Image (cartoon, helix red, strand yellow):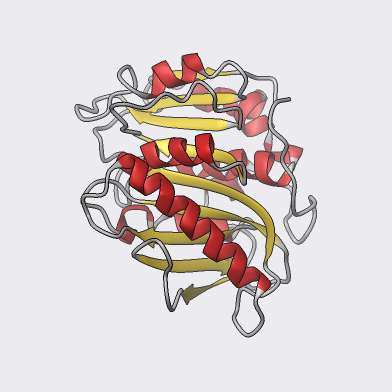
Amino acid sequence: MYGSGEGTPPGNGIPDPTTASLEATDGPLTTATYTVPSPSGYGSGTVTYPTASGPYPGIVLMPGYQGTQQNLQWLAPRLASWGFVVINVGTNTLTDDPESRGRQITAAGTQLLALGDAPGNPLSGKLNGTLGATGHSMGGGGVMAALRDDSRFRAGVPTAPYHPNGNFSGVTEPTFFLTCQSDSVAHGNTYAMPWYNSMSQAEKLYIEVPGDHLCPMTGYGNKAKQGKWMVSFFSLWLRADTRFSPFLCGPARDADKNDTSLVTRWKDTCQF
């Protein structure tokens, strides 16, 4: 396998996943939130984290053009309740380009890890040093920039990603592209699929679903399925928890992959 997931061992309060549990709104762990008091290098940050003792991998959520933390608010508690410390960020300005968003993902990851190392805050001792990222639109382009430029990021999920000048053939970490069939802004054929095809040294997953450019955002799309795929992908590649692999590469995924009302295109580098 390419990539090198490290982190929380399987069984650290995380039961064996099932289709039903992964498609539920919340996972098995109780979570709480913490507002970053002085964001450094990005606009704002709200952290959702498991209240149980860690440590856990960290994940940065990055919105798209004109977007705010609301864009991916649905995803923060979902991921955190499966054993991740998730920082949902707001950008310096609403019009920051994908490269800027990539730098802000890196800055948010740096501060998240620093909070985990510092005493006197709820995140102390919660982070294990492993990072991932997901983002929408220009935020998805930012995820690709972070994977390209910052080796601390070990897996990424760019959703409806947009980056008009991106070359990501050198990305080697596991990447899950989630795209929208009717996207007139960042169709998979324009950005995500050429990147997928160029990344010869990475484990990859590409899922296209019905909907327009907003399909990965809060309030749009099939969040039970999207959440299941993202939780499984990050659990496998950030925690090396192979219990989640069947939902991406094994028989448990076939009902999704073969349902044309749910998935309009699926590509992968299984087995992983």
Q: Determine the image quadrant of residue 207.
A: top left
Task: Determine whether 135 is above or below 172 in the image.
Answer: below
Q: Is residue 187 visible?
A: yes
Please count the marks in the image: 0
Q: Nearer the viewer, residue 158 or 198?
A: 198
**x, y (%) of residue 212?**
24, 33
Q: Is residue 151 left or right of residue 188?
A: right
Q: Is residue 266 left or right of residue 190?
A: right
Q: Is residue 168 left or right of residue 190?
A: right
Quarter of the picture containing the N terminus is: top right
Q: Residue, x 37% and y 53% (percent of image)?
A: 72
Q: Residue, x 61% and y 63% (percent of image)?
A: 113
Task: Determine whether 21 is above or below 154 in the image.
Answer: below
**x, y (%) of residue 198?**
49, 15
Quarter of the picture containing the C terminus is: top right
Q: Residue, x 56% and y 24% (percent of image)?
A: 204
**x, y (%) of residue 163?**
32, 31
Q: Residue, x 57% and y 22% (percent of image)?
A: 254
Q: Is residue 77 visible?
A: no
Task: Determine whether 34 is above or below 133 in the image.
Answer: below
